[in-house]
């Protein structure tokens, strides 16, 4: 995996034909085609058909498959800078492209943390030089993610930081959180907070309950999350800030958020694909690939997350992509690293909810396309004319078996390893350039 | 201009000057008229006169201040008062009790006017309740600093001829500023259009109820302003994460030539001092010909002379 695996920019006009056009934003769902010019969507509709010889446009046959806006993944950790052995921007971008994800938002929990203007600039330059999908970064909201001093939020925002987060750290100091929510508001920036009360979660390594008791592992109660979410909602009400609970995992947190939205507060939330499709029982006999924060919860909580998604109260689905070295996972459960790979399997895993009849395609895809775009003020996430030609061609039905060694990530800690999933991206386009095509042998 | 200004014309039915709050616009205007005359008289060669001869003025400063204390001292001396300075920088002792004990001790000395600065809001008013003499608030915590507002108004009036209708932007740490509070009250009373600009963390939660236009982008606040009034920000605010850093504060809220271009070409630049160069104001702006920072100091003496005289007039003979 050499970093210089960039794809040559392809500015030629082209048309994608024989597709099922599907735009989660507009609700468009019809057979047709799409024309790309200058990296943008120039036209889309049933009138764009294969026309051999009639024009010189390059033509791509979508084989009747779904053509959707490329996914936007709001929570991707890489190891760059500092831990490039886990993942680089280049390898993460290849994994994203293979998953139909055309925009990734990096977390600032790198070494050093992205808490300074020069580091935002570093990510942007490295991504431009090495990545094959769009890469943006969130910046730390406290210096060194230490939860003590606010970062230079205004300057970071001007440098291109999309939002502010301490990744998997929680700001315990309520006055500091108030200042951050108040200050970010002036720069129209979103605060993305990982909610976990440090003291309550202190030694917990999985959900607190029957399973943890049976395994003899320390549990983390759901209250550890909900207490912080509820505190933050009150501070949002006080300050008028824009708050996003990064990845909630339990029904009570969702209820708190629903109540806040009913009061018209600027409160949104995300859920990881893991918490929508897996639960604490998957840990089985200490399988560390299912160790993550927040921990996988009870089945009832998972169902509540799916219901929240269906009703639109869960705004976004994130992969929470967190590549870990195999040595850090091959340890006793309590000592193993947290985190799971996710960006490449985000869409296929999410499609399980659709195939199981849990949710319609539109609300499912909305949470990975137009909704994150709206929250972060990004272009894309739709098939609107004039928007960037960030696209994915998706074979909805094809069953395939996840084989972790074949994933594009540098690390292989996928909780979906060896599972049979149904549906995947077969082509991805970023700014009109094809960045991924599923090889025939694997299809 | 050889006759000294007369305080007799001023109608000021107050024993103390504790704040701008409670003053009528006409009272403020007549105080400014007197101070205006004092300023002119101060520029003549004969400055000293007998208006307060035989009166005792005590400057009681619980918080250190070079310019305000010396301004009050000079004002008293020009009027021939006997001026005594007491600097009581107490930090560890029980303040409430000490303040009242001090008040009673001083009262026993039978002064005529006490000028008080204290770090706690309301301390000056508390002291005024326990003494027989007139009390002037020279700044109490984050509450009021009435003579600063008066000298600012005088400075503006001498340049613009009036206060009414002017657009005045007050920028910086509004939340912790007694100067901002007194100025908002005074400028509003005289019909100015007041804007404040600060990051939300340095604005009162209810800033929109102060009768001012609230901005969190300084460039919006100073757009077409007639006066740009900067406030001092203390470094402690950065440590408390109310603003991230000096660098960022200056970038968004520091007055430099670039931002100043938004204001009217004849906009006045003011600062109560002492200034933090490169934090809330650039040296180029602070030292420019449009900066009235030194003139504010001069007007300070004139305003304090006016205040001392009108309060002395209300004292028993």
Image (spheres, grey):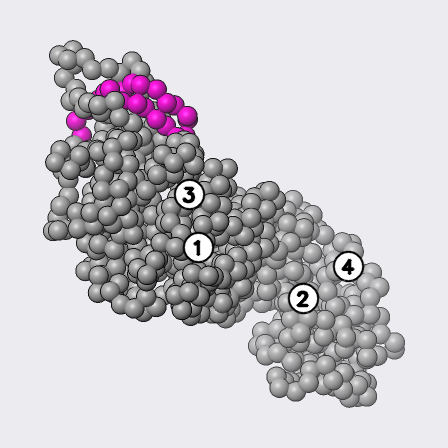
Badge number at residue B23? 4
Check if mark 2's residue and mark 4's residue have beta carbons within 8 Å: no
Mark 4–mark 3 distance (CA, rounded to whole Å):
56 Å
Tell which subunit mark 1 falls on.
A
Indicate the secondary structure of the residue bearing disc 3: strand
Name the dominant secondary structure of the magenta segment.
strand
Tell which subunit mark 3 falls on.
A
Q: Is residue A264 above or below residue B58?
A: above
Indicate the secondary structure of the residue bearing disc 2: loop
Which residue is tagged 3? A316
Name the N-terminal-most of marks 2 and 4: 4
Name the N-terminal-most of marks 3 and 1: 1
Q: Is residue A180 above or below residue B114?
A: above
Q: Point out the frontmost of discs 2 and 1.
A: 1
Which residue is tagged 1? A297
Both on one chain, marks 2 and 1? no
Q: Is residue B139 above or below residue B228?
A: below
- Residue situated in front as seen by the camera: A169 or B75: A169
Q: Could you tell me which residue is drawn at 64 percent across and 75 percent down?
A: B119
Q: Is residue A387 left or right of residue B24?
A: left
Which residue is tagged 2? B143
Query: Could one spot residue A383 in this view of the protein?
Result: yes
Both on one chain, marks 3 and 1? yes
Q: Point out the frontmost of discs 4 and 1.
A: 1
Both on one chain, marks 2 and 3? no
Q: Quick one: which residue is furthest to the right in this view? A: B316
Check residue A21 for magenta coloring: yes
- Residue situated in front as seen by the camera: B76 or B276: B276
Q: Point out the frontmost of discs 2 and 3.
A: 3
Residue extent of the magenta highlight: A11-35
Q: Could you tell me which residue is drawn at 77 percent across and 59 percent down?
A: B23
Check if mark 4's residue and mark 3's residue have beta carbons within 8 Å: no
């Amino acid at each position: 995996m050499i970093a210089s695996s960039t794809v040559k920019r392809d500015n030629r006009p082209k048309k994608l034909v024989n597709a099922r056009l599907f735009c989660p934003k507009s609700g468009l769902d019809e057979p047709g085609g799409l024309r790309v010019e200058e990296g943008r969507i120039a036209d889309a509709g049933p009138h764009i058909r294969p026309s051999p010889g009639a024009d010189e446009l390059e033509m791509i046959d979508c084989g009747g498959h779904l053509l959707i806006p490329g996914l936007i993944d709001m929570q991707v950790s890489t190891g760059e800078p500092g831990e490039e052995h886990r993942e680089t921007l280049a390898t993460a971008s290849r994994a994203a492209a293979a998953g139909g994800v055309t925009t990734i938002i990096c977390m600032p929990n790198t070494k050093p943390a992205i808490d300074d203007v020069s580091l935002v600039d570093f990510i942007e330059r490295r991504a431009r030089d090495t990545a094959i999908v769009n890469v943006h970064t969130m910046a730390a909201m406290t210096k060194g993610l230490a939860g003590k001093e606010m970062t230079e939020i205004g300057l970071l925002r001007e440098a291109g930081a999309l939002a502010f987060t301490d990744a998997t750290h929680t700001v315990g100091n309520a006055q500091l959180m108030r200042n951050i929510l108040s200050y970010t508001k002036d720069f129209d920036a979103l605060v993305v907070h990982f909610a976990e009360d440090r003291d309550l979660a202190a030694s917990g390594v999985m959900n607190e309950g029957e399973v943890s008791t049976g395994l003899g592992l320390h549990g983390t109660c759901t209250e550890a999350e909900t207490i912080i979410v509820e505190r933050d909602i009150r501070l949002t009400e006080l300050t008028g800030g824009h708050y996003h609970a990064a990845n909630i995992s339990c029904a009570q947190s969702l209820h708190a958020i629903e109540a806040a939205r009913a009061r018209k507060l600027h409160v949104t939330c995300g859920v990881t694909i893991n918490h929508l499709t897996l639960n604490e029982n998957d840990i089985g006999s200490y399988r560390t690939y299912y160790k993550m924060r927040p921990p996988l919860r009870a089945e009832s909580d998972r169902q509540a997350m799916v219901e929240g998604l269906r009703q639109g109260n869960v705004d976004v689905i994130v992969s929470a992509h967190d590549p870990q070295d195999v040595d850090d996972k091959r340890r006793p459960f309590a000592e193993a690293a947290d985190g799971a790979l996710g960006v490449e399997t985000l869409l296929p895993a999410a499609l399980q909810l659709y195939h199981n009849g849990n949710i319609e395609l539109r609300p499912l895809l909305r949470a990975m396309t137009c909704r994150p775009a709206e929250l972060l003020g990004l272009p894309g996430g739709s098939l609107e004319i004039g928007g960037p030609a960030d696209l994915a061609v998706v074979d909805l039905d094809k069953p395939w078996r996840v084989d972790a060694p074949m994933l594009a990530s540098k690390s292989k800690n996928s909780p979906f390893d060896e599972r049979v999933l149904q549906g995947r991206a077969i082509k991805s386009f970023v700014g009109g350039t094809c960045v991924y095509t599923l090889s025939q042998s694997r299809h | 201009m050889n006759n000294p200004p007369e305080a007799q014309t001023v109608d000021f039915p107050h024993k103390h000057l504790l704040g701008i709050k409670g003053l009528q616009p006409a009272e403020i205007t007549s105080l400014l008229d007197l101070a205006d005359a004092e300023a002119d008289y101060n520029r003549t060669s004969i400055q000293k006169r007998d208006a307060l001869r035989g009166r005792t003025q005590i400057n009681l400063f619980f918080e250190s201040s070079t310019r305000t204390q010396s301004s009050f001292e000079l004002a008293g001396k020009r009027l021939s008062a006997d001026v005594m300075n007491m600097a009581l920088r107490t930090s560890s002792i029980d303040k409430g009790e000490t303040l009242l004990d001090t008040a009673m001790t001083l009262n026993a000395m039978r002064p005529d006017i006490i000028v008080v600065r204290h770090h706690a809001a309301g301390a000056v008013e508390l002291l005024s309740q326990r003494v027989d003499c007139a009390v002037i608030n020279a700044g109490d915590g984050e509450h009021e600093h009435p003579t600063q507002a008066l000298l600012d108004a005088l400075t503006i009036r001498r340049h613009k001829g009036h206060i009414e209708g002017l657009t005045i932007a007050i920028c910086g740490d509004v939340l912790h500023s007694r100067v901002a509070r007194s100025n908002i009250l005074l400028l509003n009373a005289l019909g100015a259009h007041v804007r404040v600009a600060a990051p939300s963390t340095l604005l009162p939660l209810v800033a929109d109820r102060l009768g001012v236009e609230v901005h969190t982008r300084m460039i919006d606040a100073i757009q077409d302003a007639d006066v740009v009034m900067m406030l001092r920000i203390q470094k402690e605010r950065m440590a408390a994460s109310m603003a991230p850093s000096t660098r960022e504060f200056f970038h968004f809220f520091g007055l430099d030539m670039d931002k100043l271009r938004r204001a009217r070409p004849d906009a006045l630049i003011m600062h109560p001092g002492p200034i933090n160069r490169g934090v809330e104001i650039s040296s180029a702006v602070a030292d420019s010909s449009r900066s009235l920072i030194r003139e504010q100091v001069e007007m300070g003496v004139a305003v304090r002379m006016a205040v001392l005289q009108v309060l002395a007039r209300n004292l028993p003979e």
